[in-house]
Image (tube, coloured by chain):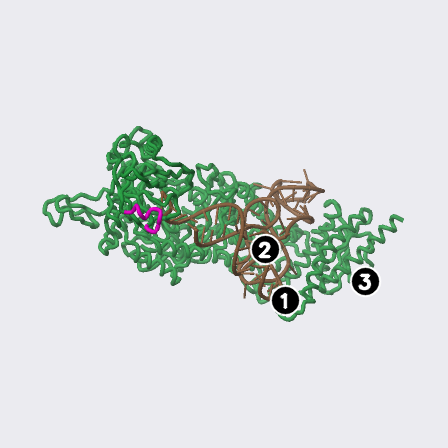
Chain colours: A green, B brown
Amino acid sequence: MSEGALPKGYEFAEVESHWYNHWEKESLFRADAMGQKLPYSIVIPPPNVTGQLHIGHALNNTLQDILCRYKRLRGFEVLWAPGTDHAGIATQNVVERQLGAEGLTRHGVGREAFVQRVWEWKARYGGIIINQLKRLGASCDWSRERFTMDEGLSTAVRQVFVSLYEAGLIYRGRRMINWCPRCMTALANIEVDGEELDSFLYYIRYPLPSGKGSLVVATTRPETMLGDTAVAVNPEDHRYRAYIGQKVILPIVGRNIPVIGDPYVEREFGTGALKVTPAHDFNDFELCGKHHLELVQVIDERGIMTEQAGRPYAGMDRFACRKQILKDLNKSGHLVKTEPYKHRVGHCYRCHNVVEPMLSLQWFVATRGLAQAAIEAVKEGKTRIIPAKWEKDYFNWLENLEDWCISRQIWWGHRIPAWYCPKCNDVIVSMEAPKECPNCPGAAVEQDPDVLDTWLSSSLWPFSILGWPDKTLDLEKFYPTSVLVTAFDILFFWVARMMMMGLEFMKEVPFRQVYVHALVRDAEGQKMSKSRGNVIDPLLMMDKYGTDALRFALTAFAAQGRDIRLSEERIEGYKHFVNKIWNAARLVLMNLADFEGPVRLPEAPAKPWEKDRGGEVLGLAHRWILSRLQRVAAETVESLDNYYFNQYAQVLYQFLWHEYCDWYLEIIKPDLYGRGADAGDLARSVAAVVLEKILILLHPVMPFITEEVWHRLPHTSGMTIMKAAFPEAQAEWIDPEAEEQMETLMAVIVAIRNIRGEMNVSPALKVEVACLCVQDAELDLLKVHQSTIADLGKVSKLTIAKAGKIAKPRYAAGAVVRNMEVFVVLKDILDFDSESSRLQKELAKLEKELGLTHRKLSNDDFLQKAPHEVIEKEREKNVRLGEKIDKLNRRLEIMNGLRESRAG
RNA sequence: GGGCGGGUAGCUCAGUGGGGAGAGCAUCGGCCUUACAAGCCGGGGGUCACAGGUUCGAGCCCUGUUCCGCCUACCA
C-alpha cells in the first residue's frame, strides 16, 4: 500500500483487513488514562456473547465508531470501552440446545458440569461477535475488553447486591411474578412481551346451588377455572347485586365458591361477571388478598396441571387441558358461547412461550427511590436524552416502575450472594461465603441456588467496566462517560437502570448524553427478524459491497426520530460512492506521480488570493473549492456535534461528488495535464490538499478507503490518517466573492449544456457560443474564464461581448443567465419549432413565478408587516424576472420571425 | 384505552428559528470525452394526506378528520 498511482479497481477486502490489523498493531485505539487530552468516553452496549452481528449492531456500532474517530481527530483522549454480556437465559438456552442435540439435559449433567460447559462454549464461540465488530471497523480499545462474568465485574455485582441489601433496597419476598415454564425461571415484568393473539372469549355458566338461576362468566383461559375460588361482580351492577354473598357451583369441579362484589370488575366487559383464579392471575391475586379468598394452584412451574386440578386434568399440559375442559363444559352444557377475541398475551422475551403468573419466593430491588433519583438527574439536565422526545417515555416508565424481580432460576449467571442456615432459617448476605451460620456454631450454610438477572450486571456496566469497586485511573478519567449510543428498545431494560445504579454507587450519572437512534427495518417497514426472513445480514453486505459502503449507507439513513428502512440496493448504491472517491484519488495521484515540488497550500493571509504568490495567483476555482471546504468542515462539526448523522453523510457526499469532482477537478484538468495557463504545481497542490481534507472529514464514517488513499498521498509519509489534524474551518479562507463568481460561471456553463441537451446537439459536436453581458464585472469574469467555459461547454468559438456592441446571433438558441444572454449558435441544425416551444415553456415557468412576486408586492399588508430584507429580496426578484421575461419574449419573437422567413 | 411518530416526486426519505419545494434511487433523452459506463451531460415528474384556523406569508404553528406504524395498559 505504497505511494504512487492507484490500481484501477478498489479492492476493499484486502484493504480493510490490512488497515484494521495495522491499527490494532499500532495500538491506535488504546486510550491513555494518564493522558493530558480531554477525555471522551463511550461504553459499548455489550452484545450478547451468543450474538451474531445483525444490522442493528452494525448501525449502533457504526455511529459509535463515527463519534470516537471524530473525537480522536479533534484531539480528545478517546476511550471506547468494549465487552460482551453473559446473557443468562439466552446463553443457557443455547447451551441447553446443544446438550439436547447430544441427548443430554442440563439436570442430567448437573449444575457444575453445565456451567463448565457454558464456559467452554464461551471460550469457543464468545469471540465471534467481537471479530465481527472488528470487521465493521470498530475502534474499540480491545485492551480493555470485559465480560460481565469476569472476576472483577462479578465482584462489582456482589458488592452492589450486598450494599443494596444492607440499605434495605434488596429484599426477598413471596409475590406474584411472571414465570416462564419453558425457561423455568422468574422474569421481570419488562422481560415479558405482550403479543397480540387471535383467541376466543369463552362464556361459562356457574349455576346457583338452589338450581334457580346462574351466573355466566367470560374468560380467555377456561382451564384456570379449576382453580377458581370466587366469582366477582361490580357492586354497582344491579343485575348481580343480589348475588353478592351467595355461592355458585363451580362446574365440573362441583365446589361451591362465593360471589363477591368489587369495583374492579368492569360491568361492560363480557357478562360483567368475573371468575377469580387467585393463583394464576395478577388481578385475581389482588382480589384474593382483599377478600380473603382461598388460593388453589392448578398449574405448576412446567405448565403442567397439578394434582389440585383433579382428574382427569392433573398431569396434562395447560393447553391440552384447555381443550379438554372446553370439551367437557360443552358436553355438560355449561359452555354458553364462544366468540373470537383478540387480546394480548404475555410471552417470554427469550423463548416466546406464554408466561404464567405465579406466586413465588424471589429477590427484588426496591426501585422507588432509585427511580426518583434517575428521573431527577434527567430533569436537572445532568444527562440529556437526544432526541428529547424519549425523555417523556423515560419519565413515564420510571414513574410507574414496580419493584424489580432480580432472581432467576437458572444456572448461568452471578450466583446470589445469600446463604441460608437450615437450622435457624437465617439469611446471610455477604461478599464471601460464610463458613458457618453466625447464630448456630458449626451449622453449614447453603447458598441460594438462584442467579441474578443479567440486566443487573449490565446496569453496572459504565463503572464496572472501568474497574469499580476499585478506585482506578480509568474511573477517574473516563467516568461519567460522554455519551451512550443505543436504540430505544433497551432504553428501559438498560439505560434507565444504568442511571439508577450509576447515581446510587458513583453518586454521578453514568453518561452526559444518551443518543437514541433508530431501529433498522426492512424496505416494508417491518422489524427485521429471522422468522420473517427479511434480515439483511451485515456480514454479507460487507462481503459484497465493502464495510465503508455499508457504514455509509447506515449513516446516510440515520436521521433522528425515524426508523431506517434499509434495502440492499441502497448499500450497493453507496458502493458507487466509494468507487467515486477512489477514482477521484486516482486522477489526482496520477498527476502527482511525477510531481516533484512539495504539495503545499499557500499560507492563509487575510485575503490569500490577492497576494502574488511568487507568480502564482490563486485562481477562482481554487479560491472557490477552498472556501467551500471550510463551510463543509464547519457543517461536519455541526452535524456530528448534534448527532445529525445523515446530514454529515450527505454534506460530504454532495461536496466530494458534485463540487470537487464534477466542477473543480473538471476545471483544473487542463492544469493537471499541463495545458492550462495556471499549469502545474498550484492546481496539483490545491487538488491534493482538498482531497486530503475530504479524506479526514470522511474518515469517521469510511475509515478504510480514507486510510488507504491517505497513505498514497505523497506528503503523509506513513502517518496514519487517524492522527491527522482535523481540518477545522478557517474563516479567512471563506470567500463569498469567489463563491458568487463561481456560481455565475457555472450557471453560464449549465445554460450552454442545457441548450445543447434540449436541442439534441451531440456531445461530440463543438458549438459556437456568444455571451452578451450588461455588467462589466460579468464581462470580465467570463473573459478571464473563457477557456473554462469553452472546455466544459464544448465550445468551438466563444464570443464574449458587451450587450449592444455586437448583434445577437440569428440562428441560435438562447438563455438568460443573471444579466447575461447566452446564445448557442445552431446555424444549420436549429429547429425553430423545438426552440420556440422550449422558450415558451421557460416563459410559462417564469411568468408563474412573476405572478407570485407581483401578488406579494401589491399586497399592502405584506409591504407593511414583512421584514425589510424580505421585501427587498422580493423586489429584486421581481425586477430580475421582468428582465428575463422581456429578453425571452424578444427572443421568441425573433424565433417566430425566423421561422416565417425560412418558411417563406 | 392511553401515548408517540409518520403521511412531501414513481420509490426511500431530507427540509433542525414560518419568507423562492430538495436529495438519492428509479425514469426518459444524449454520450465508451485518456479518474470513474460502479461513469458523464441534460430533461421530465409534487393541490407537501384532508378540512379549517392563526399570519402580510404555512410543508413548517394551532384545531379537527383520516390512514399507517410503533410503544404502553390489570376489560378477564
Asked whether the beta carbons under mark 1 and mark 2 sit within 8 Å of each other, the answer is no
| Tag 1: amino acid | Val
Q: Chain of mark 1?
A: A
Tell me if residue A143 can be seen.
Answer: no
Instruction: Please state if A313 lies on the left or on the right of A62 as rendered.
Output: left
**Which one is nearer the viewer's eye here, A652 or A87?**
A87
Magenta stretch: give its range: A235-244
Is residue B1 or residue A361 the one in the foreground? Answer: B1
Residue receiving disc 1:
A870
Q: Give the residue pinned by disc 3.
A: A805
Q: Is residue A695 left or right of residue A163?
A: right
Above or below residue A123? Residue A845 is below
Instruction: Check chain identity for marks 3 and 1: say if they share one.
Output: yes
Q: Amino acid at mark 2?
A: Ser
Q: Which residue is mark 2?
A: A685
Q: Tell me which numbered mark, 1 or 2, is placed earlier along the sequence.
A: 2
Instruction: Report helix, strand or loop for mark 1.
Output: helix
**Residue A637 horizontal/vertical position (percent):** 50, 58
The answer to whether residue A368 shows anywhere in this view is yes
Distance from disc 3 to disc 1, alpha carbons, whole Å, reads 36 Å
